[in-house]
Image (spheres, rainbow, N blue to C red):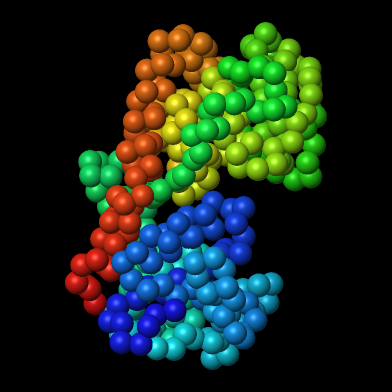
Amino acid sequence: MSEPGTDRATLFLSRTWKRPGTELSFVTRALAGAASRTSPVTVLVPSAAGPPEPDGAFDLIGAGVGPEGSWPAATDAVWPGRLPAETTIVVDEPDPAVLALLDFHAPGRLVHTIMPMDPPVPRPLRHLRFTGSPGSDAPDVIGLHVPINPLAATHRHNGLGFTGYLLVLSDRVGPPDVSPPTPMVAWLTARFPDKEVVVVEDATAAVWRGRVLRGIVDVYTRTDLWRLVAHARVTIDLAPGPLIARECVESLRFGTPILVPEESAARPHADAGGGMTFSGYPELLTGVAHLFDESVRASMSSRGRSYADSHYGDQQAFVDSVGRALGTSVPSRW
């Protein structure tokens, strides 16, 4: 929480803070960490009111909780005290409940949102952007710091005795079931019957070859996933995250090219030279075939790693970018 007498602070209102498996939670936590370098940070969450709850670098303040974990009614909510007049407000998931809360406790204040608000509402909102090419075609993009462990590239995943496979991050939702494969995976293993296709889905990696399931290994940790990514020929992400396509950035930082849907948040990463996009089976299969050309893959690997390290591997640049975007390192615009 902010200290008495501090003339600037940042307040985060987050529904996803306690859901660390989501990309939105990852981005929100990263943004809060960077913001804490330039101003005191307070985190308000929809949970039972009471003493602040320790959570790493932050103490979470419970605002109270509404139906199904939503924000409480504005008149019933706990609001942090002793916030400076110049407090920057950030909301991870803007919805009518949290906007009503802000209209009651912080009327007229500019609100920065991580997810976009759809449809727009008649109040000051500014959507923060995390993908693009900062400083060139999208100067308002914040970027992010996406960490990896370079040591993951030194040893392959213990459950696999081979490398150079086609790694597929699945888009299947619903109860876990590795067989039969999704249509995209079926096309890949039929078109390239002599290649291993490793499909990550529901914390497992299923190995397909010649349309036959050869085995399943567990993906226990993020390091397990990084090892799979680092030793693949290509990462094919069928459902990139909506904010930064985190796994695609991680893949590029390991020097593994990406193949991603044309209409996705990962497209800027591919367009930067680290991969290709596809809009159907023919383009997907053609893209994979190109990456069996070692010179093509080497070029994409080099360009993709340079781009990802530059835009998503520099902690200080991210802190500076957040300070500029939130107005905590320059005079306030309020």
Q: Quadrant of the N terminus?
A: bottom left
Residue 3 lies, in percent from the top left, at: 37, 83
Residue 254 lies, in percent from the top left, at: 47, 30
Give the residue drawn at x 61%, y 29%.
Answer: 228
**Residue 119 in sight from this viewpoint:** no
Does residue 300 lie above or below 135 as drawn?
Answer: above
Q: Nearer the viewer, residue 158 or 121?
A: 158
Q: Nearer the viewer, residue 281 or 67?
A: 67
Residue 56 lies, in percent from the top left, at: 54, 65
Give the residue drawn at x 44%, y 16%.
Answer: 297
Give the residue drawn at x 54%, y 91%.
Answer: 75
Residue 20 lies, in percent from the top left, at: 60, 57
Q: Nearer the viewer, residue 103 or 320?
A: 320
Q: Is residue 278 left or right of residue 141?
A: right
Q: Quadrant of the C terminus?
A: bottom left
Q: Is residue 96 left or right of residue 34?
A: right
How many numbered circles are shown? 0
Does residue 226 lie above or below 18 as drawn?
Answer: above
Q: Quadrant of residue 87?
A: bottom left
Q: Residue furthest left?
A: 331
**Residue 148 in sight from this viewpoint:** yes
Q: Is residue 82 left or right of residue 180?
A: left
Does residue 141 lie above or below 307 as drawn?
Answer: below
